[in-house]
Image (cartoon, rainbow, N blue to C red):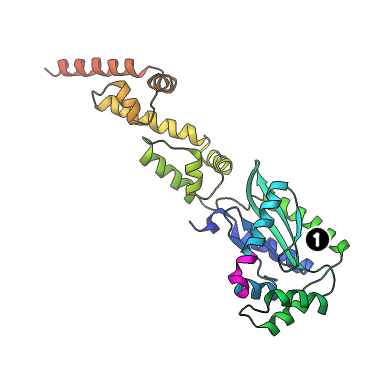
Amino acid sequence: MDFKEIIKYDDLISVLDNFSYITGISANFLTADNQWVENKKKGTCGFCMLMKQYYQNGEACRNSDLAGAQTAQKKKGVHVYRCHMGLVEAVIPLFFNNSYIGALFIGQILLEPPTEEKWQEVFEKIKDQPLDIEAARRSFFNLTHIDHEKLQSVLDMMHIVAKYILDSEMIRISSLSSIEKIIEYIKNHYMEDITLDDLAKMVYLSPTYLSYLFKKQLGITVKEYLINIRLKKSKELIETTDLPIGEISKMVGIEDQNYFSRLFKKKFGVSPLNYKKDKYIYDISKKNANT
């Protein structure tokens, strides 16, 4: 599934672009399943692009980003850190009903103007890597630098942007395709052991967020929908077969016959056994009427 189906992609890009245009600092979003939504106006800095392409095959950059996101997620708050190349980045995690849905990143910046001394520290790390050292040097000296006071202002803006992303429900299913996929799966596999976690993994959402979206679209929970499908199928089996109630219960995915009977009576106002008896009486009466 394309991750663009679970976000308002154009809206999120617009927010990232505007943030970068105002601050002059790159802003990107990392989804919960570790896919990047990158702004277009500022983009990733030239120095970082070189590092991601050529320094340790980009592994060091990926590990630094993921570690930053994980730390912020554990802290449940903004995390400011230096990457493996000494550049300052900040990340703020986004949660919906205590479920992590992604992280807003800004960077990469310096808190002081680039110097030859700092460049030498970087040079020692990259000198044996297959990259254009002179291009790396030029891009290093073009890095954005801000002071601590401006950094604090940028962090304040990050909080505002993060809240706006959440309030606007930008991280969501942008069409009904994922909910339809869940419904189709339940209809075809209702007789199996189905968990909310398994369904959530199918559409790349957290269980909590899937529950929210499902109820918002259908007015009932995933569990209620599954039970309704199972009861509907059990009623059809009672009407069209002579199978025992216990066997029908298991065929629709409910192992506990007593539990099944309670659900059936609550749904249809009569126990499955009495429904079976009524159906038998009706069939006999109909047969006698035709003889």
Residue at 88% x, 62% y is 149
- Disc 1 target residue: 154
What's drawn in magenta, residue-wise? 54-61
Q: Quadrant of residue 121?
A: bottom right
Q: Can residue 193 be seen in the rendering of this structure?
A: yes
Horizontal side of 157 relative to 253 (left or right) equals right
Instruction: Identify which amino acid the numbered label 1 is placed on.
Output: Val
- 174 or 131: nearer the eye? 131
User: In the rendered image of this protein, does residue 81 appear above or below residue 113?
Assistant: above
Horizontal side of 75 relative to 148 (left or right) equals left
Q: Main secondary structure of the magenta part?
A: helix
Q: Residue furthest bottom?
A: 134
How far across and down, in percent of the image, does residue 33 sit? 57, 54
Which structural element holds mark 1? helix
Residue at 81% x, 55% y is 156
How far across and down, in percent of the image, does residue 114 sit? 81, 75
How far across and down, in percent of the image, does residue 182 sit? 45, 44
Q: Quadrant of the C terminus?
A: top left
Horizontal side of 241 relative to 288 (left or right) equals right
